[in-house]
Image (cartoon, rainbow, N blue to C red):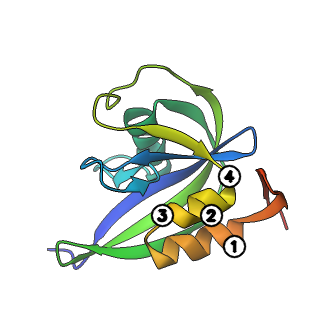
Amino acid sequence: MPTWVNQSGVLPVLNGRLCMVTSSSGKRWVFPKGLIDPGHTAGQAALTEAWEEAGLVGTLDQEPAGNYVYEKLGTPHHVLVYVMRVIEARDTWPERGLREREWLTIDDALDRVEEPGLRELIRRVFRAGHPDRITLVTA
């Protein structure tokens, strides 16, 4: 039995904002993420989670932006995170009845993130370009 759970997720970007969704319990705001199913790559799993949890269609950066670890039910979860360039945000999606979706500035998203490792990853990947927008750090 593995000592941790492998997951992948996305930081969805559209028009200079990040998309967050409510957790399945509706108590927290999170980024789309989930298990990497056997036979799938981390990137494929990340795109699937973005669609199922937030109704987002897009492309991933070629390389992951980074990773973080959090604990759930006493088990560490390792999450590989990609930046997703959103092409389309559909009005209906598989978990629409379970989750809310919201587009946020970087500061507002950081205020909602509970996992310290994810917060640091977001700070490394994005920098404030304008108070109401985010800019990707490319170098």
Q: Position of residue 23 (x, y in %)?
A: 33, 50
Asked whether the beta carbons under mark 3 and mark 2 sit within 8 Å of each other, the answer is no
Q: Nearer the observer, disc 1 or disc 4? A: 4
Provide the residue designation for mark 2.
65
**Cα separation between marks 3 and 2:** 8 Å
Provide the residue designation for mark 4.
105
Instruction: Look at the numbered disc 2 and give the secondary structure of its residue.
Output: loop
Of callouts 3 and 2, the N-terminal one: 2
**Cα separation between marks 1 and 3:** 15 Å
**Cα separation between marks 2 and 1:** 9 Å
Q: Position of residue 2 (x, y in %)?
A: 20, 75
Q: In the drawing, what numbered circle is on residue 91?
A: none
Label 2 Cα crowd, 10 Å radius (few <14 / some 14-19 / many 20+): some
Q: Nearer the observer, disc 2 or disc 4? A: 4
Instruction: Look at the numbered disc 1 and give the secondary structure of its residue.
Output: helix
* Type of amino acid under label 2: Ala
Instruction: Give me the residue at 80% from left, 57% from top.
Output: 131
Provide the residue designation for mark 1.
124
Label 1 Cα crowd, 10 Å radius (few <14 / some 14-19 / many 20+): few
Q: Nearer the observer, disc 2 or disc 1? A: 1
Is residue 32 shown to the viewer in this render? yes
Q: Position of residue 30 (x, y in %)?
A: 43, 55
Q: Name above or below for residue 95 compared with residue 81.
A: above
Residue 8 falls left or right of residue 89: left
**Depth check: 24 or 111 in front?**
111
Instruction: Give me the residue at 58% from left, 58% from top.
Output: 109
Provide the residue designation for mark 3.
80
Asked whether the beta carbons under mark 2 and mark 1 sit within 8 Å of each other, the answer is yes
Quarter-wise, where is residue 115 in the image?
A: bottom left
* Type of amino acid under label 3: Leu
Of callouts 4 and 3, the N-terminal one: 3
Of callouts 1 and 3, the N-terminal one: 3
